[in-house]
Amino acid sequence: MEFSIRSAQRQDLDQILDLIMQLAIQEGLPDEVKITKGQLSAALFNDHPKVFVTVVDDPRNADALAAFALYWIDFPTWLGAHGLYIEDICVTKELRGQGIGSALMSYLAQICVDRGYARLAWWVKDDNESAIKFYESAGAEIKEDFTVRHLTGIGLKSLATRNI
């Protein structure tokens, strides 16, 4: 199966938002999705975007998306060179297991290679066994001694106003 992988365009926004919700449902967190079409559009389509989305067209339907990846350019200080950090990646439920996620990861890895980036990074839920197996087969290092932390909402505002 051949896949068309490309940068997101404005006309993709509704489908990207649908994929974001599919991912949130898959992870059991649909109530945490707050992003609007306007927010996503403003983030992606401005003069100096800080985030990027790559999409995969559905090979069965030219008007539909099969997958997306949202990422940004980071700078792993210990490596001294830029990297690419994947915030989210999702393949539609109907097309999982068809090699689309693998092709998308390979595409993002090629961006890193082409640009001289030092790392491709992401995190994965502990219960996503199929993704973990794929990442391991690709040679991804597992950072078991690190735990992701998030500070949002009231906690973020509290820390921001703390006198230190």
Image: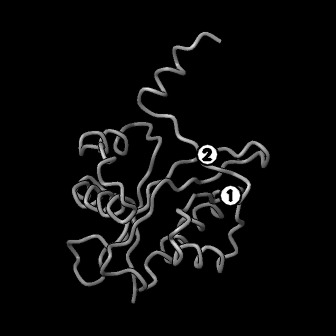
Number of other residues with Cα within 10 Å of mark 2, as a class: few under 14, some 14 to 19, many 20 or more = some
Disc 2 element: strand
Disc 1 element: strand
In the rendered image, the residue lying farthest to the top is: 163
Quadrant for the C terminus, please.
top right
Quadrant assignment, res 30: bottom left
Quadrant assignment, res 122: bottom right
Residue sitting nearer the eye, 123 or 59: 123
**Residue at screen point 49% across, 27% down:** 156
The spot of residue 116 in percent (x, y) is 69, 57
The spot of residue 38 in percent (x, y) is 24, 40
Q: Which mark is residue 97?
A: none
Q: Check the image and report above or below for 32 versus 14.
A: above
Number of other residues with Cα within 10 Å of mark 1, as a class: few under 14, some 14 to 19, many 20 or more = some
The spot of residue 123 in percent (x, y) is 57, 58
Q: Check the image and report above or below for 142 versus 155.
A: below
In the rendered image, the residue lying farthest to the bottom is: 1
Marker count (numbered)? 2
Marks 1/2: CA distance? 9 Å
**Tag 1: amino acid:** Arg
Residue sitting nearer the eye, 111 or 142: 142
Q: Which mark is residue 119?
A: 1
Q: Is residue 54 left or right of residue 143?
A: left
**Residue at screen point 43% across, 41% down:** 49
Q: Are marks 1 and 2 in contact (CB under 8 Å)?
A: yes
The spot of residue 143 in percent (x, y) is 71, 59
Q: Is residue 76 left or right of residue 128?
A: right
Q: Is residue 49 left or right of residue 122?
A: left
Residue annotated with mark 2:
74
Colour setup of the view: one colour
